[in-house]
Image (cartoon, rainbow, N blue to C red):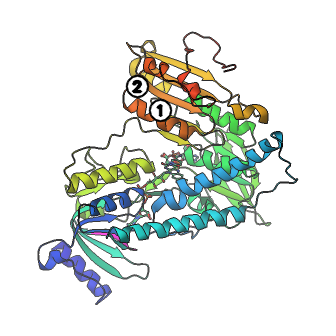
């Protein structure tokens, strides 16, 4: 009945343009699977389902940011996340390499400048090529793609709204929600939304953001402030509490100490109170210190909010489909099979409660879900020991438990922490500061000493951690690690050489080979 009513409403608003799914005429749904959201998780799930010969459709629609930035198919990671971020991080690292190069004998004429618009254009063109690539892949795999914003009409019917206001109805046996999230703006700060941008805008700026204030102190804030500093811009991080909440805090402090030593300004234990535009077109930000209550202010060219992300669930009309969310977070509650409270509706990726907000987990969850739905597979996504890397100027990669988590879970007497400060060989000739290049491995103290967590700060941290993540997934122990032969001369070999325990109090500085 609800489907009929929805179809009628749709028909009245756009006569002749809405399509009533087969559910209404023959009792059978139009699609075996309909995915709402064409990002990391949704695309992976749709493409995998199509391999089983199923009739699959994807609805993807990007609402422009409050500043009007918009982009194409592929979701956050491709357009306003991992990809442009890593490329801009690379641009910043190249600046460091240019300095190193002179020590290695390269004559580089001065002054060396970075041109934002050249970088941005190249990055944006690459992202556009990925948008196109995703469309081609969907076509090749016979997945129907619709540039429509989906919402439930009833538990099996979705209404897709086009940019011009036209609506189309779809019916499906199974529905996967993968609508991701969008950056939040603070609600109680005058001028925050009017004058501020978010990461949704930063990567699409045609001109340099200039002197930038980044508010927040987690992944997005530190990575963006890190590459802005590396590109030679004046970047400030304003943090109200600890950096990188949820990460090992000793490592987090090393990451931010390094950033501070290399030019990022940190305003600590304070929060902005207002943003105003000056007569010269700059932004005057006032902030307040939590301890003293004192206020200060400064002018910036750009203010970027990196204060977390909100799941894109509000406009899905989830109630009519019986899909439950956590009222505190707005995220969708799912079980181990990614099933929501409505048995044929599933959710994956950033919109799901309690899952990591990472591309590889969204992709893996989407693929496994399709295999369980349409193949013989019964495997569930394992969210334990998910490796990750924070792409700050000195990268931080980790997998497994932090020292705090391991101590809390097993007690200090039951864990052994091996650690070392090391010097990457390439830092020596370049006379780079290696004071914060540090590795920490958290092990159980029982028997063979199972590895519980590995933390690495240094160049190419993601590349280093990826391989060890396999070992840890397979239950690697400290004694097995000690039998592993290193590759010399690399930074990764320092992991297999770890032998100093924190408990011993011995100096963990590595000297020589
Ligand atoms: P998304 O990729 O966000 O896709 C959701 C899609 O659904 C979007 O296209 C959206 O517009 C669309 N949509 C929303 N509502 C509707 C609707 N009603 N109808 C139709 N379409 C809709 N992760 C990493 O692993 N490594 C990184 O280095 C990394 N860097 C990041 C850097 C930044 C700045 C950010 C913000 C994130 C980063 N992430 C990174 C996280 C990663 O991007 C996300 O975890 C991932 O994209 C989540 O995938 P998803 O499928 O859940 O959603
Ligand atoms: P997070 O939720 O991780 O962090 C939000 C940050 O903003 C915290 O430092 C928080 O401080 C601060 N904050 C929140 N509200 C305010 C406020 N009103 N005023 C000042 N500060 C505030 O969000 P992110 O956007 O950084 O990251 C979202 C997710 O995206 C991550 O969890 C990650 O999974 C993913 N991501 C992954 C990356 C990667 O893999 N390399 C890179 C970037 C993102 P407090 O701690 O005090 O609450």
- 166 vs 372, left or right, is right
Can residue 99 be seen in this snapshot?
A: yes
**Callout 1: 10 Å neighbours few (<14), some, many (20+)?**
some
Asked where in the image residue 198 lies, by quadrant, the reply is bottom right
In the rendering, at what x and y percent does residue 100 appear?
A: 78, 41
Residue sitting nearer the eye, 228 or 244: 228
- 128 vs 318, left or right, is right
Is 98 within the magenta?
no
Ligand 1 sits in which quadrant?
Answer: bottom left
- Mark 1, ligand 2, within 8 Å: the answer is no
Secondary structure, mark 1, is helix
Which numbered tag is attached to residue 277? Answer: none
In the rendering, at what x and y percent does residue 140 appear?
A: 36, 70
**Callout 2: 10 Å neighbours few (<14), some, many (20+)?**
some
Asked where in the image residue 218 lies, by quadrant, the reply is top right
User: Cα distance, mark 1 to mark 2?
Assistant: 9 Å
Residue sitting nearer the eye, 408 or 480: 480
Q: Residue at x 55, y 64 (%)?
A: 127
Secondary structure, magenta segment, majority class:
strand
Q: Which residues are magenta?
A: 147-152
Can residue 63 be seen in this snapshot?
A: no
Determine the residue located farthest toward the bottom in the rendered image: 16
* Contact check, label 1 and label 2, Cβ < 8 Å: yes
Which numbered tag is attached to residue 476? Answer: 2
Q: How many marks?
A: 2
Q: Residue at x 77, y 57 (%)?
A: 114
Q: Quadrant of the N terminus?
A: bottom left
Which residue is disc 1 drawn over? Answer: 468
């Amino acid at each position: 009945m609800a489907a009929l009513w929805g179809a009628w409403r749709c028909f009245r608003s756009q006569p002749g343009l809405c399509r009533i799914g087969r559910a209404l005429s023959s009792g059978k749904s139009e699609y075996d699977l309909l995915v709402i959201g064409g990002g990391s998780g949704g695309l992976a799930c749709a493409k995998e389902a199509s391999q089983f010969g199923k009739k699959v459709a994807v609805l993807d629609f990007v609402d422009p940011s409050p500043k009007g930035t918009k982009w194409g198919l592929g979701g956050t990671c491709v357009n306003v996340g991992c990809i442009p971020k890593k490329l801009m991080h690379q641009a910043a690292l190249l600046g460091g390499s240019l300095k190193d190069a002179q020590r290695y004998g390269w004559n580089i004429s001065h002054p060396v400048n970075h041109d934002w618009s050249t970088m941005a254009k190249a990055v944006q063109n690459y992202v556009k090529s990925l948008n196109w690539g995703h469309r081609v892949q969907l076509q090749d795999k016979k997945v129907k793609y619709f540039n429509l914003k989906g919402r439930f009409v009833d538990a099996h019917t979705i209404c897709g709204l086009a940019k011009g206001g036209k609506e189309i109805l779809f019916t499906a046996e199974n529905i996967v929600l993968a609508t991701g999230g969008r950056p939040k703006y603070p609600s109680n700060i005058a001028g925050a939304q009017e004058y501020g941008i978010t990461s949704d805008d930063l990567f699409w700026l045609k001109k340099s953001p200039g002197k930038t204030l980044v508010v927040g102190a987690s992944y997005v804030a530190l990575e963006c402030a890190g590459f802005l500093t590396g590109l030679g811009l004046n970047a400030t991080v304003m943090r109200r509490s600890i950096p990188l909440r949820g990460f090992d805090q000793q490592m987090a402090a090393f990451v931010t100490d390094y950033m501070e030593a290399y030019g990022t300004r940190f305003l600590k234990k304070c929060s902005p109170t207002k943003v105003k535009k000056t007569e010269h077109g700059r932004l005057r930000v006032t902030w307040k210190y939590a301890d003293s209550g004192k206020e200060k202010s400064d002018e910036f060219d750009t203010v970027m909010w990196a204060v977390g992300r909100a799941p894109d669930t509000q406009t899905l009309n989830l109630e009519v489909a019986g899909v439950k969310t956590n009222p505190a977070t707005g995220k969708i509650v799912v079980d181990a099979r990614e099933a929501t409270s409505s048995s044929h509706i599933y959710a994956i990726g950033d919109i799901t409660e309690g899952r990591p907000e990472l591309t590889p987990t969204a992709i893996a969850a989407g693929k496994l879900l399709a295999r369980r739905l349409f193949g013989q597979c019964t495997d569930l996504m394992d969210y334990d020991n998910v490796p990750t890397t924070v792409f700050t100027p000195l990268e931080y990669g980790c997998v497994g438990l932090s020292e705090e988590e391991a101590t809390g879970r097993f007690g200090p007497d039951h864990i052994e922490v091996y650690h070392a400060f090391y010097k990457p060989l390439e830092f020596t000739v370049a006379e780079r500061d290696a004071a914060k290049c540090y590795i920490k491995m958290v092990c159980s103290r029982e028997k063979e000493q199972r590895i519980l967590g590995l933390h690495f700060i240094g160049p190419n941290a993601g590349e280093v951690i990826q391989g060890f993540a396999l070992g840890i997934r397979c239950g690697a122990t400290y004694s097995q690690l000690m039998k592993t032969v290193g590759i010399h001369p690399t930074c990764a070999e320092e992991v297999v050489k770890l032998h100093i325990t924190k408990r011993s109090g011995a100096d963990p500085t590595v000297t020589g080979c």
